[in-house]
Every structure is written in C-alpha cells, then in structure tokens.
Amino acid sequence: MKTMCYCGALRRATRRVTARYDAALEPTGINLAQFSLLRNIERRSPISLTALGRATQLDRSTIGRNIKVLERMSLVQCAPGGDQREASVSLTRKGRSVLATAEPLWDEAQAEIEKALGITGVADLKAIIGVL
C-alpha cells in the first residue's frame, strides 16, 4: 500500500480516545460505553431495549448483554414493557448518582480532547462524522 489505511488509523485513534475517557471515568466504576448507555437511558427513560438499541445503533443482543451488566451493578432496573415480549429500562437512584458523578469527569476528558484537536480539528472531526 502506498497510502495509510484511513479506516485502520481511525480505529487506532478511537481506541486511544476511548482509553482517555475510560481513564477519566475510572473513579466512578464505569467505562465510556456504560456511561453512554446510562446517558441514553436517562434522556429517554423509561425506554424499551429495542428502542435503546435503535437510539445507540447497537443490536438488540448487545444491548441486552450490556444492560444485564448495568443491572448487576444496580445502575438500571428493567420492568415489563407495554408488550410482554419487551422490557423497558430506567436508571436506579444509584445509576443517577453515578451518572451525576461521571458527567464532570466526562466533561473534563471532552475538553482535553477538544484542546488537543484545536478549533479546526474539532470542526474537521464533526464534518467527518456528520455532526455539522
């Protein structure tokens, strides 16, 4: 290959950025993926697992496994949904507390990433991922 594989480079960059957020969130006992799920649940609660999967662009089985972990950590609770085949999930009191503690830590990591990228880098990143 004569040029760098952009996909591989982005995957490596994503792992490094994720590791930075995970390190910031470590005092709370959750990682970035769990933080993201908790935030999505908070914003849409109660939400069915299927709808949560659509909102996070994760398949239903992945959501189910991740919710079971959060449930064992007592951060979320599942209840029967409107349809007997579907459960809905919401945050517990502990989940809200952990999320409240995690948010400023996430903000700090976010600011660090933005500082490293600079104004132009942030704008370029947003353009690449389609946020603009």
Image (tube, rainbow, N blue to C red):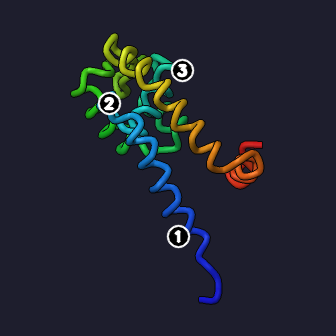
On screen, 25 above or below 5?
A: above
Q: Compared with residue 49, is residue 62 higher up or lower down, i.e. above or below?
A: below
Q: Amino acid at mark 2?
A: Pro
Marker disc for residue 27: 2
In the rendered view, tell whether residue 58 sits above or below residue 51. below
Local secondary structure at mark 3: helix
Give whichever of discs 3 and 2 has the lower sequence position: 2
Q: Position of residue 42 (x, y in %)?
A: 48, 20
CA gap between label 1 and label 3 equals 33 Å
Disc 3 residue type (three-letter): Arg
Q: Residues within 10 Å of mark 3 (few under 14, many from 20)?
A: few
Image coordinates of residue 117 in percent, x first then y, are 66, 50
Q: Residues within 10 Å of mark 1 (few under 14, many from 20)?
A: few
Dot placed on the residue nearer the N-terminal end, 1 or 3:
1
- Ranked by sequence position, the earlier of labels 2 and 1 is 1
Measure how far apart labels 3 and 2 are at the Cα level.
Answer: 23 Å
Label 2 crowding class (10 Å Cα cut-off): few <14, some 14-19, many 20+? few
Numbered label attached to residue 43? 3
Q: Nearer the viewer, mark 1 or mark 3?
A: 1
| Residue for badge 1 | 8
Task: Please state which of the two labelled residues, at mark 2 or mark 1, is closer to the viewer.
Answer: 2
The number of discs equals: 3
> In the image as oriented, which residue stretches furthest toward the left?
72
Q: On the rendered image, what quadrant is the N terminus found in? A: bottom right
